[in-house]
Amino acid sequence: MLLWALFICTVLLFLAIDLGIFHKKAAIISNQEAAKWTLIWVLVSLCFSGVIYALYHTNFVENPEKLSPSNALLKYITGYVVELSLSADNIFVIAIIFSAFKIEQKHQHRVLFWGILGAIVFRGILIFFGTLLVQEFNWITYVFGGFLVFTALKMGFKKEEDSFDPKNGSVYKLIGRILPVSPIDDQTRFFVKENLKTFVTPLFIALLIIEVMDVVFALDSVPAILSITADPFLVFSSNIFAILGLRSMYFFLANLLAKFNYLEYSIIVILFFIGVKMLLQSFIPLPEWISLAVIVVSLATGIAASLKNIKKNR
C-alpha cells in the first residue's frame, strides 16, 4: 500500500508541476516544446524501468507472478510500448473532437490535463477488475484474446466513410438531454451562469466526450497489456506513464498523424498478434522479447511506409 501511495502521489506531483508551473497560463504549445516534453516523458518512463528492477530485486513490491527483476523490467517496457502505440488512435480522435467543437489550441492543454486525471481514475478501476479477473479466472484471457482479434478485424475491414463525428454521437446527444448547454461559446470555463442558472460550455462537453472515448480505448488497451502481465503494479505503472505522455504527444503528432496513414495497420497487427497470443498462450507460450520485437517492428514498418508515402506525394 505504501508503494502504491508513493507512486500515485508522485504522478499527482508531476501533474501539479506541469499545470501549476510550466503551463499555468493558456498558450499555444509549439511543435518544438511538444517534442521536448514528449522526449522528457519517454525518458522518465524508461528511467522508471530502473525503479521496477530495484523494487522486484528487493521484493518490496507484491509479486503474484514470481517475476525475476529482469523479467519484470522487460514486461514493464513491453507494456509501456504497447500502451504508447495504442495511443495513436486516441490522439487522432482527440484531434477530431477539438476540431468539431472548435476548441482553440491555447485552451486544449487544460482540457487534456483534466482528461488525464479522469483517465487515471478510470484506467485504475479497469485495471483493478481486469487483473482480478485474470488472477481468479484463467479462462478470461481467452475472452480478452478473442475480443482483441475481433477489434483488429473490425478495424481492418472498416470502411473509410465510417468516420467518427462527436456531434452526431450518442454521448453528445445524451449530454444535451441531461445538462443545459450554454449557447455562448466560452472557451475559458467549463461552466457559466446565466440568470442564476448553471450551463455547461462546449469546453466541458469536449472534456466529457474525451473521457468516454478514453474508456472505450481502454477496453482494448487494458486486455492488451494483461496479455503481457497480470501483475497489478506493472500494468498500472506502464499504463499511467503512457497516459502522462499523451498530452505532449498529442501536440507533437496531432497535425502529423493524419499523414501517417499506414500507422493504423501497425495498430491492427499489434492488436491481432496480442489477441492470438492470448488465445494460444496455453499451447504456444512466447517469450516476452518476441512480443516486444513484433510490436517495435510493426510500428517501425508503419512509420517507414507512411514516410515513404509522404515523400512520394510531395
Image (cartoon, grey):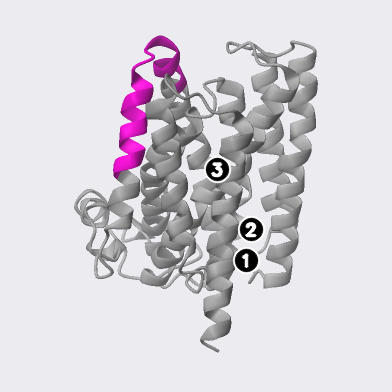
Residue bounds of the magenta highlight: 131-150
Marker disc for residue 252:
1
Magenta-highlighted stretch: main secondary structure? helix
> Label 2 amino acid?
Ser
Query: Quick one: which residue is furthest to the bottom in this view?
Result: 314
Q: Is residue 54 visible?
A: yes
Label 3 close to label 1 by CB (< 8 Å): no
Callout 1: helix, strand or loop? helix
Judging depth in this view, the residue of 257 and 6 nearest the camera is 257
Residue occupying the point 57% across, 76% down: 308
Measured along the vertical axis of the image, is residue 117 above or below residue 302? above
> Label 1 amino acid?
Phe
Label 3 close to label 2 by CB (< 8 Å): no
Marker disc for residue 82:
3
- Sequence-wise, which precedes: disc 3 or disc 1? 3
- Sequence-wise, which precedes: disc 3 or disc 2? 3
